[in-house]
Amino acid sequence: MSRIKITLPQTKVFETKLSIRISDINYGNHLGNDSVLSLMHEARFRFYKSLGYTDELSIDGVGTIQVDTAIQYKGEGFHGDEVKVEIYLGDTTSKSMDLYYRLAITDSDKLIALGKTGIAFYNYTEKKVSNMPDSIAEKLAGFTS
C-alpha cells in the first residue's frame, strides 16, 4: 500500500505552541487523528492573526477555504504535552496557497505529524473562489525574499 509522504518546503513562516487537551485524546489514550487536524487549524488561525487579520474570513474582503488536506502521522502525543507547530509556505497561485505543518513535542522535538493544507481564497457572499488579496500576497512574498 502506498503511503502519503510529505516533504516540508524551506520557507518557515510561523511557529506556535499548543497544549494537548484531554478532549484531544482518543480511545488509544493518545492524540487522536482528528485532533491533529484541529491543532493544524488552530496554528493556521494564529498565523493569520500574526499577519494582522482578525480571522480566516476577513482578509481584505475575502475569506479562505480549505480545499484539501494530507497528514502523515509520525508519533504519539499525550495529554499535557506541549506541541510546537511550525507552518511552512509551499506553492502559491493567484487564488491559493499550500501550507505545510510540522508538529513535534516541544521538549524533545519528537515528531508527531507532518501535514499539508491547500487553502483557496473564497468569497463567501458570492460562493466562489477569488483572487488572493494583494495585502496577503505581499506579506507572503516577504517570507521568500
Image: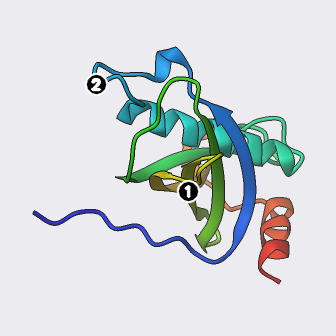
**For the residue carrying disc 1, how many other residues have a C-alpha within 10 Å: few (<14), some (14-19), or many (20+)?**
many
Residue under label 1: 102
Q: Which residue is farthest top?
A: 22
Q: Is residue 15 left or right of residue 117?
A: right
Above-or-below relation of 68 to 12: above
Q: Is residue 138 left or right of residue 117?
A: right
Asked whether residue 92 appears in the rendered view, the answer is no
The amino acid on which the numbered mark 2 sits, given as a three-letter code, is Gly
Q: Which residue is farthest bottom?
A: 145
Determine whether label 1 and label 2 are within 8 Å by CB: no
Foreground pick, 75 / 101: 75
SS at mark 2?
A: loop
User: x, y (%) of residue 62?
Assistant: 72, 45
SS at mark 1?
A: strand
Residue occupying image coordinates x 47% and y 39%: 37
User: x, y (%) of residue 104?
Assistant: 56, 50
Which corner quadrant of the image does residue 76 belong to?
top left
**For the residue carrying disc 2, how many other residues have a C-alpha within 10 Å: few (<14), some (14-19), or many (20+)?**
few
For the N terminus, the quadrant is bottom left
User: x, y (%) of residue 91?
Assistant: 57, 74
Residue under label 2: 28
Q: CA distance from mark 1 to mark 2?
A: 22 Å
